[in-house]
Amino acid sequence: MRVLVVEDDPMIGRAVLAGLHEQGYAVDWVRDGAEAELALAHAVYDVALLDLGLPRKDGLEVLKGVRRAKNDLPVLIITARDAVADRIAGLDSGADDYLVKPFDLDELLARTRAVIRRHGGRGQSEISYGALILDPARRRVLFQGSEVELSPREFAVLEALLKEPGAVVSRERLEDAVYGWGEEVGSNSIEVHVHHLRRKLAPQLIRNVRGVGYRIARLP
Ligand code: CA
């Protein structure tokens, strides 16, 4: 899962970034509205966390631009503007949710998951495929009835493969789901995560599709 954080306050930005990284999200952090538009034009995100009071371009204008471009990216507004009129303006401009600062980091993470889940058309938070059950809220994975411990990045790879179960996912897309900008990506790091996942779950769970990428198999 790749998240765009648009926040000019360095303290809040760092805290949000750390919380998201801990949960295994790939995160790009930009600090003004113009940079946000540039990022949105060049990468595909699963969700954006958008401050409103931003240098160069107001967050609300960024949001309106996203919706004008028929981009249905899930957007969660995080702002100090707490007046009812501001909340209404944010939601009416196409935000999926609205959280007022100061907020609790755990609440932000829960709302982020909820926005992504609703966007995927799922009311349930768990994703199950054959004998595999993934619970993004609790960061838990069950396979054939037993809980399996995964690192945040292994979890992110598995989650990306389960987004469209059975479809082939390219290595590039997996890298996008696991690493944010400026993070060092080793040339074989996705292979390493896949290797660990196979060892911890089942060797035949993740199939190589030569030259294309990986797909997850439905195991009983
Ligand atoms: Ca701000």
Image: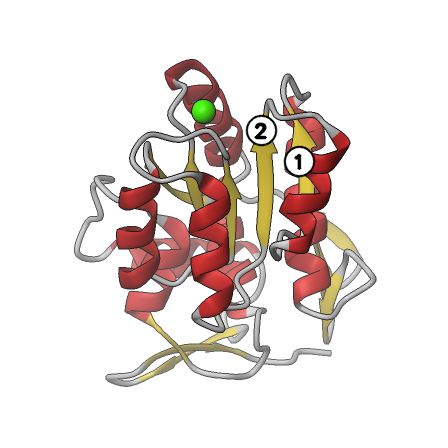
Residue 9 appears at what percent x and percent y?
A: 41, 19
Residue at the front extreme, as displayed: 85
Q: Position of residue 157 (x, y in %)?
A: 46, 58
Q: Amino acid at mark 2?
A: Thr
Kind of residue sitting beneath label 1: Asp
The residue shown at (58%, 33%) is: 78
Q: In this view of the protein, which residue sits in the foreground, 134 or 11?
A: 11
Dividing the image into four quarters, tell me where ligand 1 lies. Answer: top left
Q: How many marks?
A: 2
* 110 or 174, nearer to the observer: 110
Local secondary structure at mark 2: strand
Considering only vertical position in the picture, is 117 above or below 213? above
Q: Nearer the viewer, residue 110 or 102?
A: 102
Q: Are marks 1 and 2 in contact (CB under 8 Å)?
A: yes
Q: What is the quadrant of the C terminus in the image?
A: bottom right
Question: Is the residue marked 2 within 8 Å of ligand 1, measured from its CB?
Answer: yes
Mark 2 = which residue?
Answer: 79
Q: Which residue is mark 1?
A: 86
Q: Is residue 137 visible?
A: no
**Looking at the picture, does residue 172 appear above or below residue 97?**
below
**For marks 1 and 2 on the same chain, the one whose residue lies earlier in the sequence:** 2
**Disc 1 to disc 2, how far (Cα)?**
10 Å
Residue 52 at x, y percent in the picture: 50, 34
119 above or below 153?
below
